[in-house]
Amino acid sequence: MENTKKKGLLDRLKSSRVLRVMFGRKIIVVCAVLILVMVLVAIFAPVIAPYDPNKDDLYNVLKGCSAEHWLGTDSNGRDVLSRIIYGARVSFTVGLVAVLISSVIGMALGLISGVAGGVVDSVIMRIMDAMMAVPMLILALFLGAILGQGLFNVCLAIGISMVPQYARITRGQVLSVRNADYVTAGTLCGASRVRNTLVHVFPNCLSANIVTMTASLGGAILAEANLSFLGMGISPPTASWGAMVSGGYKYLSNQPVIAIAPGIAIMIVVLCFNMCGDALRDALDPKLRGTLGNGSKKRRKATKGV
Amino acid sequence: MSEKEKLLKIQDLSVEYDTEISTVYAVNGLDMELGYGETLGLVGETGAGKTSTALSIIQLLPEGIGFVTSGSIQLDGVDMLNTPEETIRKMRGSTVSMIFQDPMSALNPVMTVGAQIMEVLKIHHPEQSRAQLEARVDEMMELVGIPAKRKTEYPHQFSGGMKQRIVIAVALACEPKLILADEPTTALDVTIQAQMLGLINDLQKRLNTAMILITHDLGVVAQTCEKVMVMYAGEAIEYGTAEDIFETDQRHPYTQGLFNAIPKLNEECDRLEAIEGMMADPTQKPKGCRFADRCKYATAECRAQQPMRQVGPTHYIRCRLFDPMQSAR
């Protein structure tokens, strides 16, 4: 029983049109693999990193690339490669937690505002509009300054600044779904308003939000790097890519690798997340159905042969 | 028949829609009675107030826009207009349920069909175990003629007729005493239509469920209903058994017009006969017969309020022509 169920899931994943279209392009596979590798690196950082990322070694300050220190050492003699590996932990944690915070709060607000309508809707959406009028990074900076440094505070600052987009998307979806026959049918079956909203309205709003979530992961990681670069993010000894860039850019002329290496790490991660987010959006877009994904053609041929 | 045997009693029901531009009088003083297990066909053109009547029975008129302004609705002994929302909510699905016009949009696209049948059962039988509910879902699927193993599939994997079967399964899952079927076959093609009507009728007999069938297809009514009510501009203008309406020459001019608009098999026919003119303006309160403007028998007397007149043992017509005091026509 257990076995058949597992196989069913695997088969379903294999035949899933969305996944097939999404990974139809080689570059997306590369991005996904890179993300996977970096996540694994972050998880197994203590095993992989050659040195303690926070251990000063004042005899080996600002060394270039060498066999002992692949990416050299920074102004305190800390191994840059080890710090990048540990920095991945901060980046992914902040990215995930911030997206989680923003999507949960945003979807809740969007649902309430869409279902309740009237004054509640107006009040919530005007606040969201006001938040949206301020650029996201400035808002995150402002919140970061109020909340202070620290991993969770950074997540919270970035998370809250990203709430409006989720609230807006969810509200729009709710409005389009709210009057569908199956929602009325739910009411007709005796479902209470809350139950109806959770069972029928909410799941139909999810797909748009999932796309936004993958797309904003990169944004959240970039925002963390920005905050850390400006000294509002993670508190100093902890390795964070943004802070590493800011600490290293003073030595750009004699030891450029200290600033450039974490910069490249940021770029790759953000690029990979954005590429995957875009690919997922395209794969889920019904308007593009049929124009993407040569995989489906192959499959059709295969099923014809059988 | 004693009072107790009636499932549904509607007296002098009026429904209004308040919009910013004007007030629409959708239903005007409607009376209706329905016994347990009976089938009533509600016929009329678009805007005659058929759906408004159905929605007011289950108290789901559009919030803030639609209002019941007068009258009373008794469903299974419950006064629907003066009962707390919570009680009525519990009646929906268990005492009364509704089948929608378009099966394509009446099912949630992201839930399996089994889960959707389960949903209504969960609401009304929270005390039952999951296995019991599963068994009931299987039973319902088989009842409407779909193999139970298909319950893990999603609505888009079913055809229109199959979807309507699922919708019927959802509506019947808690064995309601009354089903409101709002044009259940309009979105389906003719062969499936016949199948659906057969299925609904069959299940209805088996479960002893009463039904109000809303339609503008007289053929559907003839096939399924025991009683027929013809509505026009928010009023019942003719009421009787199916025989009264279909096998008689005494008809309201409007009903007659409806019959004339049906192409006949045994006659040469170039052009279908339409009823001239438009439905009376629903934003005006009625004075006298609302059909008078389009009626070729209309006289000055039609401008006065017309009562329902009994023309047969079970046959009522709201028309001056059938006044027993007069020998007109």
Image (cartoon, rainbow, N blue to C red):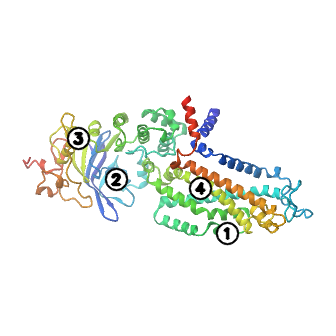
Separation (CA) of disc 1 from disc 4: 22 Å
Amino acid under disc 3: Ile
Asked if labels 1 and 3 share a chain, the reply is no
Question: Are dots 2 and 1 in contact, CB under 8 Å?
Answer: no
Q: Residue B56 carries which label?
A: 2
Front residue of this view, candidates B213 and A209? A209
Circle 3 Cα neighbour tier, 10 Å, few/some/many (<14 / 14–19 / ≥20): some
- From the viewer's perspective, is A13 left or right of B280? right
Separation (CA) of disc 2 from disc 1: 54 Å
Front residue of this view, candidates A260 and B102? A260
Question: Are dots 2 and 3 in contact, CB under 8 Å?
Answer: no
Amino acid under disc 2: Ser
Q: Mark 4 points at which residue?
A: A212
Say which quarter of the image contains residue A73: bottom right
Front residue of this view, candidates A132 and B288? A132
What secondary structure is marked by label 3? loop
